[in-house]
Image (tube, rainbow, N blue to C red):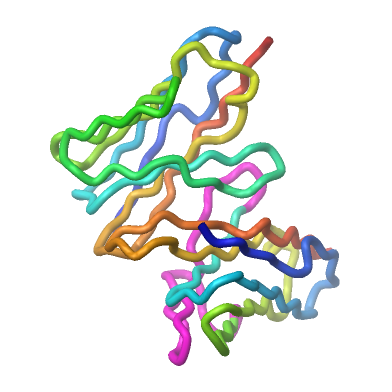
Amino acid sequence: GQQVMQIPQYQHVQEGEDFTTYCNSSTTLSNIQWYKQRPGGHPVFLIQLVKSGEVKKQKRLTFQFGEAKKNSSLHITATQTTDVGTYFCAGVYNFNKFYFGSGTKLNVKP
Amino acid sequence: SAVISQKPSRDICQRGTSLTIQCQVDSQVTMMFWYRQQPGQSLTLIATANQGSEATYESGFVIDKFPISRPNLTFSTLTVSNMSPEDSSIYLCSVEGGLAVYNEQFFGPGTRLTVL
């Protein structure tokens, strides 16, 4: 069945350093979504990527979708303490099947 | 966006009992989803609930253990039946937003369940 792998599991950075999390799917995705979950909170939608090779930016966050639509990355430039949380990718298959990656827990030291 | 509420927000239950979790949305939605998230883990889809039809369960989840109701377009319930400590988890409902083919999901605040 479909599976979305996400690495790394944890990342500890000093405030101001960059951060990247990667997602890989064993099969081609319809699209991919990214969510952020703050400690004690629920997942909140960040962005959706649909097109092969797509790149989208939200302020310090850059999202990429691979050419083969099997992998994606989220890059945060110059992390801040407000970036703390767990970042999940969600691979979408066949219109409505969401498979969440295992998540990357980001800790930012001030 | 959709505003979603869940009841209860948390509960502590005894082994062998059942708990029904309610999910209310502030607008009509076609599909509602129920997820389980164990502490520090990812989200696992339990089932998809459509109004007027039986829920569609994912592999590893069965209706006898997790019966779902979807009486209208703004409400759904998930029951965790005959609970064991392994059922201790956060249960979240979600809905799709927008009219596009691929939609982001909006999540409720979750129900934190502890089974003793």
Q: In this view, does B2 lie above or below A12?
A: below
Q: In this view, does B62 lie above or below A57?
A: below
Q: In this view, does B93 lie to the left or right of A5?
A: right
Task: Determine the residue positioned at 82% across, 65% down.
Answer: B11
Tell me the chief SS of the magenta region: loop
Task: Determine the residue positioned at 75% across, 77% down.
Answer: B19
Instruction: Where is residue B10? Give x, y as percent.
Output: 80, 61
Instruction: Where is residue A85? Give x, y as percent.
Output: 60, 32
Image quarter of residue B77: bottom right
Magenta region includes residue B45: yes
Instruction: Where is residue A32? Give x, y as percent.
Output: 32, 46
For the N terminus of chain A, the quadrant is bottom left
Q: In this view, does A27 lie above or below A13?
A: below
For the C terminus of chain A, the quadrant is top right
Q: Is residue A39 above or below residue A57?
A: below
Q: Give the range drawn in magenta.
A: B38-66
Numbered-mark total = 0
Task: Determine the residue positioned at 59% across, 16% down.
Answer: A80
Task: Determine the residue positioned at 78% across, 78% down.
Answer: B16
Asked whether B43 or B73 is in front, the reply is B73
Q: Is residue B99 left or right of residue A83?
A: left
Asked whether B112 or A17 is in front, the reply is A17
Magenta region includes residue A64: no
